[in-house]
Amino acid sequence: MWSSGAIALEKVGHRAPAESSNLTVVFVSTGLGREYALAFAERGASVVVNDLGGNAKGGGKSSAAADKVVEEIRAKGGKAVANYDSVEDGEKLIQSALKEFGRIGECCVIYNGFLFVFQDLIHRIHLRGSFLVTRAAWDHMKKQKFGRIIMTTSAAGIYGNFGQSNYSAAKLGLLGLANTLAIEGSKHNIYCNTIAPVAGSRLTETVMPPDLVASLKPEYVAPLVLWLCHEQCQENGGLFEVGAGWVGKLRWERSQGQIMRQKSRPMTPEAVRDQWDKICDFTDATKPTTIQGQHALGSITVNISPNPWFRKKRALAVGQKLPVSTFNFNHTQCILYALGVGMSTKDPDHLRFLYEGHPDFSCLPTFGVIPSQAAMMDGGLASIPGLNIDFTQVLHGEQYLEFYRPLPTSGTLTSEATIADVLDKGSGAVILLDVNTYSGGELICYNQFSVFVVGAGRFGGTRTSAKAPLPPPKRAPDAVVTDCTTRDQAALYRLSGDWNPLHIDPGFAAMGGFKAPILHGLCSFGFAARHVLKQFANNDPSRFKAIKVRFAKPVMPGQSLQTAMWKEGSRIHIECKVKETSDVVLSGAYVDLHQARQPSFTGGRLQSDLVFTEIGRRISEVGPELVKKVNAVFGWEITKEGKTAAQWTIDLKNGAGSLQKGPYGGKVDVTFTVADEDFMEVVQGKLNPQKAFFSGKLKVRGNIMLSQKLEVILKDYAKL
Ligand SMILES: CCCCCCC[C@@H](O)CC(=O)SCCNC(=O)CCNC(=O)[C@H](O)C(C)(C)COP(=O)(O)OP(=O)(O)OC[C@H]1O[C@@H](n2cnc3c(N)ncnc32)[C@H](O)[C@@H]1OP(=O)(O)O
């Protein structure tokens, strides 16, 4: 009787007990091959016993080994045929099975070559031979939707072995072949596994001591092979060590590694040396099983299993402060930033942001992100212990910025960043960073950065954030502005301090999955914000209170941005699209404005509601008769404080003033004068016009005349 072996299975290689014409191609080398052949035949398989019959050096050729095994099988009632072709003639092998058994049944190919010494033979027999035989059987397997392939590798291939370089290379090549066959075959129910057996054979007996060979009986290997060939076995792409009655599985392990290529830090050999311990630290190692888990292609380990930092350490990180950063700047940085977000001298209104000699030279409000961003760029996020994120996978998710004081145009600002929260967004993790920026101890602005780490989600964290984006009203926008970014927009914007290579380096962008470097989110943010500032705040930075934006899709430098705006009280909702694609790139965005309050000089113009209010007050002071007249003609009620929602402009060049938008329409002309010396001080920026009006220093003298046109004559202005 046949022994049932180590595995109590009725049939190996059969899909149904009724079908018995399996084909098992077994390469015999007396030891393992013979054992497999006997074991398969015992369970009803039809066996092709192939052996060239060579010696350990690949020489000689005899049919004795294969014939002996076939005789043994037939003597026990099994079906077997001998084949003496070289494995390089894989097709002949398969044909001999067809000839003998009439058809190819469910097919197992077991490649089991042991051959030492000659480089060429080793590669031809081990690698090429297994490839050729498998290829010959492949289509049959596909057709019958069943196949099992076993490759035989060796510990010498897996671990290397002294003096066996050629053999090791060929054997590990087999593993590579098997891995790919496993992937390609799986949808056809063709599974391919690899074993590294330790067994005594006619080849090993020449190099191993006899008692060791005796303990490594082929019978201890065959049961694993039989199980791997069974239709119930779903193992595919596995690698097993087997011998002396023991079976174990091997797999790859990858350390968490260390991201070497940081935003502003070049990757150098010194940096690799300094991070060597981290690169080789297998704490929290992952077990990649597919090429998709291969780090260099951008799908970092977090794609296969959540980055352990998010799972285990994020709670500890919340509330943690990052190192305080200091930002020194002057008008150069303000101007560079304005250019970076698309300002141009083509638009005269932009000059106040581009020319430091302009009487109203100011920083664009969104420059407020720059000092705080520096807090994170200078090693901020990288300084969080254990947070080893791949910066090719980091995208800017959202941004909130709020002002408490106007931004100066030069000075030293300090920023304190805190990790506010870490959110699990499913497809990614969001790290929220709160940053307060101070000037001389006074809080200037607050930023909240949302850093979206692609692929790092599903670690079981909360999902909600405090500063949610808001959808725009469901009506046509009140204004739409279209603006072009240039091909070099990102190259220019980065000079303001966001050195992330994602925006300039095609290789880095490719690792993040982008065809080309993308525009900084904060650059599009700057574009949209200045559209609002111009459209609804007359380019007055002091009106800018807060802005919230979600970066919904990347923008490529050179694309046109179309900002749609809806005014709802003091809130301006924004949605920004790329004109060429109609993709929404900034969503749920809004700007909050202050009421127009503070008078200021712009391009030689004095603009303010308060000025008008003040004039109203002066009118009421000058004479009750005049007030009556004004009220009678225009239906105004000029109180001591004045009453208007109007915008008032005094054009210093012409020395004339006019009411641009009266609450009741119409125009009123007034003439008055101010002292030359006071006026000069205002023009030179030494005297704040608002304060001057209220303190009475900037005096309104002379007549105030009411007519159809309101006119303010600034005495002797022409001389200035
Ligand atoms: C240290 C330095 C700090 C500063 C870092 C920034 C440095 C800069 O140099 C980097 C940049 O400027 S990158 C350029 C600007 N940003 C972008 O282009 C990102 C564009 N957005 C996207 O691609 C996707 O929205 C994407 C990929 C972000 C998300 O898309 P999906 O994975 O498809 O997500 P989706 O299925 O739509 O939604 C899943 C959950 O995530 C929320 N979500 C979506 N977009 C988000 C975003 N932009 N920010 C935050 N959360 C976002 C969704 O709401 C959803 O969560 P929930 O179900 O709770 O609503």
Image (cartoon, rainbow, N blue to C red):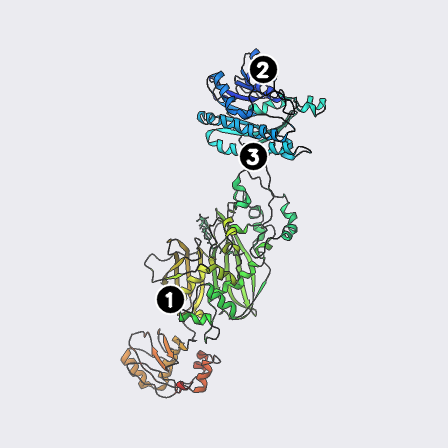
User: Taking 490 as reference, is 627 left or right?
Assistant: left
Which circle, 1 or 2, is nearer the viewer? 2
Q: Quadrant of the C terminus?
A: bottom left
| 439 to 146, vertically: above or below | below
Q: Position of residue 587 (x, y in %)?
A: 41, 55
Numbered label attached to residue 160: none
Residue 37 lies in what quarter of the image? top right
Q: In the image, 508: left or right of 540?
A: right
Q: Amino acid at mark 3?
A: Gly
Seen from the viewer's position, the closer of residues 699 and 137 is: 137
Local packing at callout 2 (Cα closer than 10 Å; few below 14, some 14-19, many 20+) is many
The nearer-to-camera label among 3 and 1 is 3
Give left or right: position of 424 versus 166: left
Whole-percent x and y of residue 10? 53, 19
Give the residue at mark 1: 535
Residue picked out by circle 2: 67
Residue furthest left in the image: 633
Q: Residue type at mark 1?
A: Gln
Of the image marks 1 and 2, the number of the one nearer the N terminus: 2
C-alpha span from label 3 to label 1: 63 Å
Does the residue tagged 2 have its C-beta within 8 Å of any atom of ligand 1? no
Residue at image mark 3? 176
Of tags 2 and 3, the one toward the viewer is 2
Instruction: Verify CB contact (< 8 Å) between mark 1 and mark 2.
Output: no
